[in-house]
Image: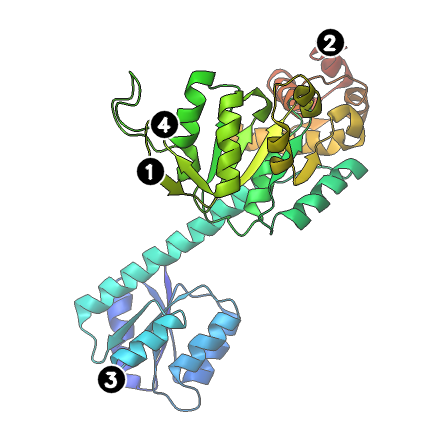
Amino acid sequence: MAKILIIDDEKAIRNTLREILEYENYEVEEAKDGEEGLDLLKKNEYDVVLCDIKMPKMDGIEVLDKAKELGKEGQFIMVSAHGSIETAVDATKKGAFDFIQKPPDLNRLLLTVKNALDRGALVEETKTLRKKISKGYEIIGESDSIKEVKATIEKVAPTDARVMVTGPNGSGKELVAKAVHSKSNRSNAPLIEVNCAAIPSELIESELFGHEKGSFTSAVKQRIGKFEQADNGTLFLDEIGDMSLSAQAKVLRALQEHKITRVGGEKEIKVNVRVIAATNKDLKKEIEENRFREDLYHRLGVIIIRVPSLKERVEDIPLLVNKFLGDIAEEYGTAKKKIQPDALEYLKTLNWPGNIRELRNVVERLVIMCNNEITLKETKNYTSFNL
């Protein structure tokens, strides 16, 4: 049941509003002035606050200001018999949801309360989703190498510097890229991902820069490329070492001039994109063998973050296993399983050529195949291929 606070110095208005709202099955509390209302706000949480503007001791705008300072999430609907456009604008600028005049129209009042509740629910849902996303980008580990990665992300993320993430397959390069974006000033804009290894070389330019209708046989309509999609956000070029030399030249031009041209087009399009690249290849060796442009390497690698292999951070395995046990239990809707200490120690002795990705797959297998507590014997049985 939604909880509503009425703050008004007129008892008749408070009684009328309470009667209307309780009839609609809302839980209602009231305060006779701004100071009393603020005291209640300090002690309790409300979904909606109906607040008069002209009151003794403390006016409604001041109550609104102080409530926002306290971090109160309730939606404020300001009410006044002395309303003006300027007052309404001032209230909404300070964070009020809406402004209605006295005496309030019944239908308008109930609709405004419903809309305020809907907005509050949406704000709460957005906060929950953001927490889940942020949690999903959490880099687990306390080893020195991972602490260094985390520290670099914290320093680099708020800037617009281009980042090159290196490391073996399955080590978490994509996670690092997402963490950089989520902690950046572009976090509210899109993060667009491109797996350069998964796109045929003849299509990579169309994928990145888009194409005009009729520019090639299958171009039946205009297509917006990834650079345009990522405008004002971040473009993550995964497996950059597999990009063709022709596409590399165009990416270099885009980085230098902040402009792109669609395949088959002539118009230059301005783009504001931060590029994060990742690779499991030795790009310096690729440069020596003329498979990667040196000038592009220097453009992309303003900051280089090397993600260690799992064998370089075995002390993090218990933390990672515990995280995966929790995540998998949440996904399956089951109780979180335990793993015996000697089984954890055994996992630290394995090779892990697939790194973090392989470890997670093994933990999921153990969760499916084992009982409530995972034993050393079971762990050996279901990881024998890792030796």
Number of marks present in the image shown: 4
- Quadrant location of residue 34? bottom left
- Name the residue rendered at 69%, 36% in the picture: 305
**Residue type of the residue flagged with mark 1:** Lys
- Find disc 2 in the rendering and name its residue: 384
- Find disc 1 in the rendering and name its residue: 267
Q: Nearer the viewer, residue 358 or 179?
A: 179
Q: Is residue 193 above or below residue 127?
A: above
Q: Residue furthest top?
A: 385
- Find disc 3 in the rendering and name its residue: 81
- Name the residue rendered at 69%, 12% in the picture: 382
- Find disc 4 in the rendering and name its residue: 263
Kindly report which numbered mark, 2 or 4, lies closer to the viewer in this rendering.
4
Give yes or no for contact between labels 4 and 1 (Cβ–Cβ under 8 Å).
no
Is 201 on the left or on the right of 60, as rendered? right
Q: Nearer the viewer, residue 360 or 357?
A: 357
Query: Element under label 1?
Result: loop
Q: Earlier in the sequence, mark 4 or mark 3?
A: 3
Q: Earlier in the sequence, mark 2 or mark 4?
A: 4
Kindly report which numbered mark, 2 or 1, lies closer to the viewer in this rendering.
1
- How many angstroms separate mark 3 from mark 2 (CA)? 78 Å
**Residue type of the residue flagged with mark 3:** Ala
Mark 1 nearby-residue class (10 Å; few <14, some 14–19, many ≥20):
few
